[in-house]
Image (cartoon, rainbow, N blue to C red):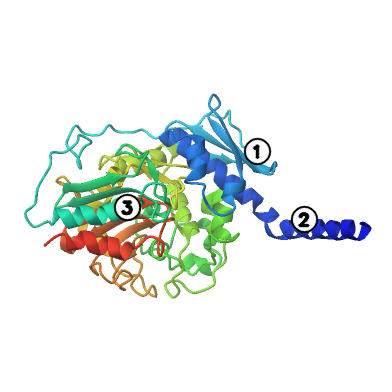
Amino acid sequence: MKKILKLLGVLLLLIVLYFGFTTYPKLDLISGFSAKSIASGHFLDNRPKELIEKTDNDIDLIHLATNTIDEAGKFATSSVYGLKERKAIYREGLGATLINDDFDVSKPYLLPKRAKSKTLPFPYGNIDPKDTIFSNIDYIQLQKTIDNAFDKSGRKLKRTRAVVVLYKNKLIAEKYDTGFTKDSKILGWSMTKSITSSAFGVLAKQGKIDIYKPAPVAEWQNDERKNITINDLLHMNSGLEWEENYSTICDATKMLFQAEDMGKVQLDKPAQFKPNTHWNYSSGTTNLLSLILKRHFKTQQEYLDFWYSAVIDKIGMSSMIVEQDMTGTFVGSSYGWATARDWSKFGLLYLNKGNWNGEQILDESWVKYTATPTNTSEGKYGAQFWLNAGGKFPDAPRDMFYCNGYQGQMVAIIPSKDMVIVRMGLKEDPAFDFNGFLKGIVGSVK
């Protein structure tokens, strides 16, 4: 009996040690992800905690978190086995922010000034459009493809939440999963990077910034990083050290779920390569770009207002909220929320070469620049947009460029077909067959 107890004791010790070396270091990230997800999903989109836990938080290790919501205080807390409790607060107009113990929740904060959406039919407003029938569209094939993108009741294989398809500036199809509607705000994750790029596009059009000059980062002026341009940053080609691997603890996960100042994380990284010689995808780079934008403006209010007045509200994305870090910098890499219809408006802006209902918001040259392959990216990346120039999706047109986000968020812009295709969900390649999905929709246009 004593031997058995000793063996059990050794086994328990081994389990504790294994947990200590493998899972414990991740607890801060697990509870951070969960608290932020709960706060955003509940307060931005009115989702019940149980739904968020079963859907958004249905990820390895994240499901270990225990979550609570304080309705009166407008915050969510999460912990794992009672350890590493994290808190995310919600502020109307700003969304949710994951905070640390030093964050002063009583401190006054500024809100971006928002413009009301125009009273026009979608896509130029939010009034439901009249049906438009095109004689060259096979609607049976189109609907079959869209239906096939969704799971049958009770299954979790494809996990599509929303699909919106625009053709020649008209809504030709849309569908939503159970519990989601055209008014549901959905996190775009890294599709937010393309919003960040567009803010630079507006400044470039206004002649207020030259992306080919060295980036205005004072901290780099005494070392080799002083030669990095905004163009290099937009192209993810700066040569700065960065690791982005969401299956482990890395620069990206530590930035999103631990850092107070997310823009500074990439700013502090050393150079590994000369600029424009080594493509490396980095969410830190995009948050650094957001910080550069912040420093460009004289006041915090101007910075907050610009994102909305220059791009988001300009094209009627009235549902969109871009959330901030603890220092008031927009998390331009990852935290943009909007309805699927509003995400499609953003795609339409680029489909129409920067023109929005007669107003040229971005120069045509900027849209071309956006969709031009980055040096060393093998045709798969432009300026904070992904490209199909290298044939990632073999049955989709090569001129397709797209916003892409974690778990399979996509806004596909296809100039040769005059189409915008939006898919929002919780599964990406290979679990969700994007190539077949795009092939079926594009192929429905004869």
Badge 3 amino acid = Arg
The residue at the point 79 percent across, 60 percent down is: 14
Taking 382 as reference, is 206 above or below it? above
Q: Earlier in the sequence, mark 2 or mark 3?
A: 2
The disc placed on residue 102 is 1
> Circle 2 sits on which residue?
16
The residue at the point 50 percent across, 32 percent down is: 109
Whether tag 2 and tag 1 are in contact, CB under 8 A, the answer is no
> Which mark is nearer the camera, 1 or 3?
3
Q: Earlier in the sequence, mark 1 or mark 3?
A: 1
Badge 2 amino acid = Val
- Spatial CA span between label 1 and label 3: 38 Å
Q: Can residue 360 be seen in this view?
A: no
> Which mark is nearer the camera, 2 or 1?
2
Q: Nearer the viewer, residue 321 or 275?
A: 321
Q: Nearer the viewer, residue 329 or 138?
A: 138
- Spatial CA span between label 2 and label 1: 31 Å
Taking 229 as reference, is 362 above or below it? above
Circle 1 Cα neighbour tier, 10 Å, few/some/many (<14 / 14–19 / ≥20): few
Q: Which of marks 2 and 1 is nearer the N terminus?
A: 2
> Which mark is nearer the camera, 2 or 3?
2
Secondary structure of the residue carrying numbered label 1:
loop
